[in-house]
Amino acid sequence: MNTIYHYPSCSTCKRALKWLKANDIVLEVKDITKETPSKAELVQIISNSKLEVKKFFNTAGKVYKERRLKDVVNSLSIDEAAELLASEGMLIKRPLVVTDQLVIIGFKEDDFKQLMKEELWTKKD
């Protein structure tokens, strides 16, 4: 399933969802605070992405700063990071787009346009 995890009050998430709608791209939309990916899902997402673990953390967020994760996050294993991220959806950088082929963190229009060219999205009929 092609999914976008978002936070309804996040302006970047709103822009990403608006762009997807304007381009007739359908993804399953999940509120990251109500439907936070499980530890097992996050282990799979992080592993499949081939991105460094730190990229998955909302380093500008309040929870990240309150927990003083700056000095810890670089030393976390995928398993440890997934457990921490699954415990609090607000720790996850968003929007987070997950497809069978790839993972996108954040919203950059050029990344989304490239995905359209590669036909990795489910498009509306």
Image (tube, rainbow, N blue to C red):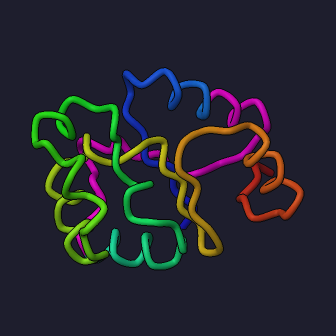
Where 49 falls versus 87 (above or below)? Answer: below
Decide if residue 100 is on the left or right side of residue 119. left
Residue 116: horizontal and vertical position, in percent? 82, 53
Residue 56 on image: x %, y %: 40, 55
Q: Is residue 33 above or below residue 39?
A: above
State the quadrant of the N terminus: bottom right
Q: Is residue 20 magenta?
A: yes
Q: Which residue does the image show at 79% across and 37% down from the upper left?
A: 23
Please tell me whether residue 7 belongs to the stretch shown in magenta.
Answer: no
Q: Quadrant of residue 102?
A: bottom right
Q: Is residue 112 visible?
A: yes
Which residue range is magenta in the image?
18-39
What x and y, as percent, mark residue 24? 76, 40
Image side of residue 74 versus residue 102, left or right: left
Question: In the current view of this chain or complex, which residue is farthest to the right?
Answer: 117
* Residue at left offset 65%, top offset 48%: 26
- Tally of numbered tags: 0
Most extreme residue toward the left is: 67
Can residue 28 be seen in this snapshot? no
The quadrant holding residue 15 is: top right
Left or right of 118 in this view: 88:
left
Q: Residue at x 51, y 56 (%)?
A: 3
Instruction: Tell me where residue 89 appears, x and y as whole percent.
Output: 25, 47
